[in-house]
Image (tube, rainbow, N blue to C red):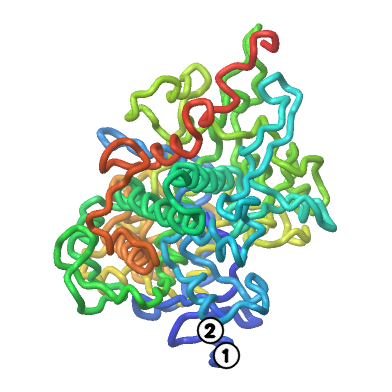
């Protein structure tokens, strides 16, 4: 998922793509002075014809209908642990930032702006502008990242304690409770829901552990840069070898990282690609752009992976209470993950969507202790073979993502307005503007994205057939009119000849076992490659570099990152599987 507030995209060579007063897509040229203040989007494919409002409404309704939601990894396929959904959201926020001057302040020059906001996989969403210019993000030593403390909840001895290092750092002052609850992090989008918030926290802790590891051998004046460099390299390695092959056809990933990019920001140059083969690349000194086909369509794949509920920890899971057992409060719903965040929610128990529109609702200003993540339920640690790292099946076990396909869980049809930058309560609960699928499709129309067929032609890929677009593999979105009848012939013709790109790449994944295919997978893999290449620290320019923090040789996955960040089973599951005996 990504922040749903964006109302315009500055595309290099075109201008500011937005809507006019009649909700028709327009392009407004910017002055040379204002251009340098914008995030640099680009267009990878041709300009497309905007989808009709009627088709967008029909697709959104079909994509968020309540019903069967297939798990990832059916049959012989490896299931994808649920934590990768929110790692993807975290990565998205590291890659795309469309913000104005207010995010930097008047003292920031153009060079710093462009470098700080380039779409590179460099964790600027964590580090901001560094400990000198963003000192508020850092601890007193000027090297470590700040972390926060949870708030005790009197359920049992395990939850009735403040736990340092298990919440995001929060501002603590403000005119409203929402301002007090705001996370003190470089990108507030990483506090939109609890799962991405805990993921951001993991990276804060990962940096701090790297600092501890290096502090004995690295001079203090070099410690921050050395630690940041090691964190970024391990992060990129994990994305290349662990994350990408789970969401994109591995053959596409191998092709891009072995032979180089074929379509996005390709320039003839020296032969390197990080794997020893001959590839083509743009100069490391050039600032990457961000294709709107990636930002507005292909990398919104994560919206399809979201589940409606999660086995979260020993307090929040689906196992009923038995006599003499610790108290459990039911499985964690997606709505609760929004609620227990500082951006979309109020960090306090509520069952009312309208409460979240009120910036002064709620009683908690920090994450309640009973909502700390049990990471063993979000990722599969069994490959490590260590005791205490398997979530107990007796209380629900672990979670897997929903398969990448054309279905979204129906709670995404009713987003809290704060998740797209509103807390005014003026959008009706059943309004289409709250539907995530509708918002994605409308944005595609706003920037005149190429259709799926146009992108397939550009890539020389086999186009989906009419039957594949309409029915997929038979388990995805069934596209019909609002009354359940067959789609109007005019809309049907529009859909099968000019398929909105986001819907197309999800249908493609649905037909490819839940992994992004020839169009969506090519876009994602090439943008990741360019974003690594464009980072100041890049494993593509250091082909001999290998991980050193995981203890498994060349293998460094998200589970290694988490184990290192949290220091073992106790940190990965701080609430433990049961409270002390006197509380049972």
Q: Residue at x 38, y 62 (%)?
A: 537
Q: Do the residues bearing badges 1 and 2 touch, measured as CB atoms within 8 Å?
A: yes
Q: Is residue 350 left or right of residue 306?
A: right
Q: Residue at x 46, y 71 (%)?
A: 118
Q: Nearer the viewer, residue 532 or 408?
A: 532
Q: What residue does disc 2 label?
A: 36
Q: Residue at x 53, y 67 (%)?
A: 97
Q: Residue at x 81, y 56 (%)?
A: 174
Give the distance between the C-alpha atoms of the residues marked 1 and 2, in whole angstroms. Answer: 6 Å
Q: What residue does disc 1 label?
A: 33
Q: Nearer the viewer, residue 191 or 172?
A: 172
Q: Residue furthest left?
A: 277
Secondary structure of the residue carrying numbered label 2: loop
Q: For residue 419, which numbered disc appears in the image?
A: none
Vertical order, 241 against 375 (above or below):
below
Q: Nearer the viewer, residue 582 or 511?
A: 582
Q: Is residue 421 left or right of residue 455?
A: right
Vertical order, 362 against 373 (above or below):
below
Place of residue 573 in the rendered image (x, y in percent of width and height, measured from the top left): 54, 28
Q: Is residue 332 left or right of residue 273?
A: right
Place of residue 400 in the rendered image (x, y in percent of width and height, measured from the top left): 43, 36
Secondary structure of the residue carrying numbered label 1: helix
Image quarter where the C terminus lies is: top right
Q: Quadrant of residue 326?
A: top right
Vertical order, 258 against 177 (above or below):
below
Q: Quadrant of residue 154?
A: top right
Place of residue 4 in the rendered image (x, y in percent of width and height, measured from the top left): 59, 62
Query: Number of labelled discs?
Result: 2
Q: Residue furthest bottom?
A: 31
């Amino acid at each position: 998922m990504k922040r749903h507030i964006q109302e315009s995209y500055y595309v290099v060579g075109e201008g500011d793509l937005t809507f006019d007063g009649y909700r028709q897509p327009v392009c407004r040229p910017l002055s040379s002075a204002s251009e340098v203040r914008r995030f640099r989007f680009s267009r990878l494919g041709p300009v497309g014809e905007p989808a009709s409002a009627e088709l967008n409404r029909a697709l959104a309704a079909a994509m968020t209908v309540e019903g069967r939601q297939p798990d990832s990894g059916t049959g012989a396929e490896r299931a994808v642990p649920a934590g990768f959904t929110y790692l993807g959201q975290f990565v998205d926020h590291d890659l795309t930032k469309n913000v104005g001057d207010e995010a930097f302040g008047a003292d920031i020059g153009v060079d710093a702006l462009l470098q700080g906001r380039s779409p590179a996989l460099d964790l600027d969403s964590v580090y901001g502008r560094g400990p000198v210019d963003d000192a508020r993000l850092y601890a007193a030593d000027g090297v470590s990242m700040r972390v926060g403390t949870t708030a005790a909840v009197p359920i049992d001895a395990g939850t009735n304690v403040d736990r340092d290092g298990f919440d995001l750092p929060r501002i603590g002052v403000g005119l409203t409770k929402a301002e007090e609850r705001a996370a003190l992090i470089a990108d507030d989008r990483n506090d939109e829901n609890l799962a991405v918030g805990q993921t951001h926290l993991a990276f804060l802790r990962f940096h701090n552990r790297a600092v501890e590891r290096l502090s004995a051998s690295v001079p203090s004046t070099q410690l921050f840069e050395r630690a940041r460099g090691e964190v970024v390299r391990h992060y990129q390695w994990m994305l290349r070898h662990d994350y990408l092959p789970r969401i994109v056809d591995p053959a596409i990933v191998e092709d891009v990282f072995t032979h180089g990019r074929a379509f996005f920001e390709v320039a003839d140059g020296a032969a390197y690609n990080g794997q020893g083969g001959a590839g083509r690349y743009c100069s490391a000194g050039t600032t990457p752009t961000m294709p709107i086909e990636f930002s507005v369509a292909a990398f919104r794949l994560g919206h399809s992976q979201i589940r409606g509920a999660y086995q979260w920890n020993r307090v929040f899971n689906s196992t009923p209470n038995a006599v003499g057992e610790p108290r459990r409060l039911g499985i964690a719903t997606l709505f609760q993950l929004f609620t227990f965040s500082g951006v979309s929610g109020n960090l306090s128990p509520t069952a009312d969507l309208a409460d979240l529109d009120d910036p002064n609702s709620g009683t908690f200003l920090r994450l309640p202790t009973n909502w700390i993540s049990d990471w063993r339920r979000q990722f599969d640690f069994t490959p490590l073979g260590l005791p205490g790292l398997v979530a107990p099946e007796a209380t629900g076990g672990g979670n897997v993502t929903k398969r990448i396909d054309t279905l979204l869980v129906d709670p995404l049809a009713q987003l809290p307005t704060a998740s797209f930058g509103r807390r005014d309560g003026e959008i009706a609960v059943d309004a289409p503007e709250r539907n995530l699928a509708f918002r994605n499709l409308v944005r595609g129309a706003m920037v005149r994205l190429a259709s799926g067929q146009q992108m397939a032609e550009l890539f020389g890929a086999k186009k989906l057939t009419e039957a594949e677009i309409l029915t997929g593999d038979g388990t995805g979105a069934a596209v019909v009119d609002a009354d359940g009848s067959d789609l109007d012939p005019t809309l049907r013709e529009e859909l099968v000849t000019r398929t909105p790109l986001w819907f197309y790449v999800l249908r493609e994944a649905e037909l490819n076992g839940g992994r992004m295919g020839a169009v969506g997978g090519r876009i994602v893999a090439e943008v990741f490659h360019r974003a690594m290449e464009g980072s100041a620290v890049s494993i593509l320019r250091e082909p001999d570099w290998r991980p050193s923090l995981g203890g498994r040789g060349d293998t460094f996955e998200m589970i290694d990152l988490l184990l290192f960040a949290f220091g073992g089973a106790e940190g990965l599951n701080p609430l433990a599987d049961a409270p002390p005996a006197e509380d049972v």
